[in-house]
Image (tube, helix red, strand yellow):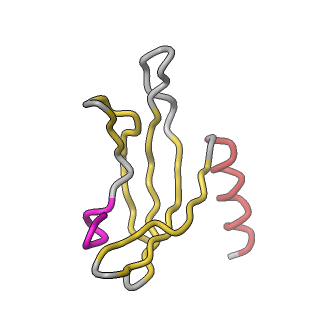
Amino acid sequence: MAETVEELTITYEENGQVLVKELEKEVLSKGAWATVMYKYQDLDKKSGEFTPPKVTIRRYKKSGGRYMPQSKFNISSENQAKQIVEVLTKWF
């Protein structure tokens, strides 16, 4: 696991093949607890193509000098992302 927030990634490879491709990363908070939002794509194993972009928000806790994942929330579609933006805009 990463020692700094900047080192955190959700890119995931298996046997040299990228299965999760990180497109963008935004650090929302740093410290003993870090919150990071990622834009990413999954590899569709059937077609060999990457899925449309998705978003995940991850929380990490620093323990023993390393960030360990604690929780996550996946935004699975563009429509869901727009709904979240609408609600947040209304509330704030």
- Residue 8: percent from the left, percent from the top? 32, 62
Residue at image coords 68%, 42% = 79
Residue ID at (51%, 32%): 52
Tell me which segment is drawn in magenta: 1-8
- Determine whether, in the image, residue 72 is placed left or right of residue 27: right
Give whichever of 70, 54 is nearer the camera: 70
Q: Residue furthest top?
A: 47
- Can you tell which quarter of the image residue 9 is in? bottom left
**Residue at horizontal 37%, vertical 57%?**
25
- Which image quarter is the C terminus in? bottom right
Asked if the stretch drawn in magenta spans residue 4, the answer is: yes
Q: Residue at x 34, y 46 (%)?
A: 11
| Front one among 10 and 87 | 10
Foreground residue among 33 and 82: 33
Name the spot of residue 85 as percent of width and height, x first: 65, 59
* Image quadrant where residue 36 sits: bottom left
Disc tally is 0
Quick one: quadrant of the N terminus? bottom left
Image location of residue 90, percent across then percent down: 74, 68
